[in-house]
Amino acid sequence: MDMDLKDFMEFVHTTARSVGAEISSPWFYLQFGLILAAAGIAYAAEAGVRNRVDLTSLAIGWPLPLRHFARVMMSSASTAVFTLLVIVSRVVMYHATWPSRSYLLMVAAKLGLAWLAIRLVTPVLRNAFIVRLVSVTAWFVAALSIIGQLSATVDLLDSFAIVLGGLRLTPLLVIKAGVLLLIALWVTNIASNFAESRINSATDLTPSVQVLLVKIIRIGLLAIAIVIALGSVGIDLSALAVFSGAVGVGIGIGLQKIVANFISGIILLADKSVKPGDLVTIGDNTGRISAMKTRYISVAAGDGREFLVPNEDLVTQKVVNWTYTDKNTLVKIAFGTNYDADPRLVCKLAAETAAAHPRATKGKPPNSILTEFAEAGMKFSLTFWIADPDGMDNVKSDVMLALWDAFKREGIRVPYPVREIRVRGGALPVETTVEVPN
């Protein structure tokens, strides 16, 4: 430890004597009572404001800065009223007696003003946890500065140190690095979101190229932010070589799947084998790619479900992309008739029925062929094209229902097995035969 224990104990004793001298004064209790009274009045005032003022409609039509100021003041009515009452009490006591006898009121007023200032600034942050963290930290720093203990606290935090190689690690250094990293990441997020909006609005870029550019920009800005933040607090990045080696070993042993998915995502974006909006079949799951992330892609099934498929699976497994080069999709329907039907008439009816569907591609006429003379009847195959694979099952159903109606009109029957059981002599054995009507 850099700080001697004797110096630290002397600092504690000095602080304790100062606090004891302040508490022993009768003016301390007067100021404390005024502060409690101001807090009670402020609490009651806030309850009244919340019952009578609608914050959502407050100051509509005002300029944005004034509207923001008014809403913050109304949402922090208790703090504003408390600060105002304490300031008035401080002014009265300052002119009625010695300034030192209203020191506690001055501290309370400055703390209230500091909290109001923080509330005015923090709404630019979106994350509620970050807002609370920044608010409490900033108020704590302001409180130390107001009571004159900021420099002593900074020296105290910098006095405890652990030396790792060429790196002197202190609590103050960790706090500074954390604050700068937080600010750098916040600025990076704003910059990357702006870049993403501009890239997504570019019409001359394909969806896969847009996603790839956004990821490259985010990763690059993140790396730059970390380097700048660590360099600003005086951390030599070469001193972190041992940690970099440990991270490399960790990646090789425990994080290889994450790295594999990340690299696979970059490959998928570069070769454009899949892109947002494509209709894909992965295993038994079919849907459209709704998003491509660093670790996975999201496939929307169309029934409310979304499948999160790791990027590595798309590189190493079989993937059916229905819209890779062409959205035109061939629809296949297999059906059969009995032997009494005219196969030429059946093929003609099937082709005409498919051509009559509104989604059938007009430039590519349907085709129906006889594929097999089976035991149960003749088997046929009907194929036709549609412009987009969306709703392909509905199209097949519509065509099969229309084909059923056409068979009914022409008296064409679809073969189906008939099972007949014969019992001889009223007892076993039982003879079973299957007949197929033609």
Image (cartoon, helix red, strand yellow):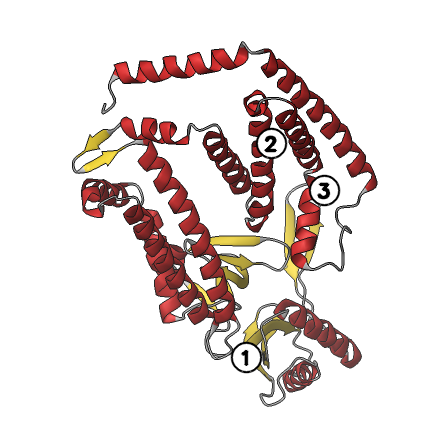
- Precedes in sequence: disc 1 or disc 2: 2
Nearest-to-viewer mark from 2 and 3: 2
Residue 188 as seen in the image, left or right of residue 57: left
Residue drawn at the location 23% of the way across and 25% of the way down:
2
Residue nearest the viewer, comparing 436 with 156: 156
Question: In the visual, does 199 lie left or right of 435?
Answer: left
User: Where does label 2 land, which residue?
Assistant: 109
- Mark 3, other Cα within 10 Å: few <14 / some 14–19 / many ≥20: some
Percent of width and height locating residue 368: 59, 82
What element does badge 1 sit on? loop
Residue 278 in view of the camera: no
Labels 3 and 1: the sequence-earlier one: 3
Could you tell me the amino acid type at mark 1?
A: Asn
Three-letter amino acid code of the residue under disc 3: Met
Mark 3 vs mark 1, foreground winner is 3
Q: Quadrant of the C terminus?
A: bottom right
In the displayed image of the protein, which residue is found farthest to the right? 52
Residue positioned 68% across, 85% down in the render: 352
For the image, the number of numbered tags is 3
Tell me residue 68's x, y (percent).
Answer: 66, 51
User: What residue is pinned by disc 1?
Assistant: 328
Using the image as rendered, state which of residue 140 and residue 13 is in the foreground: 13
Q: CA distance from mark 3 to mark 1?
A: 60 Å
Residue 360 drawn above or below residue 363: above
Residue at the spot of label 3? 74
Residue for point 71% across, 76% down? 403
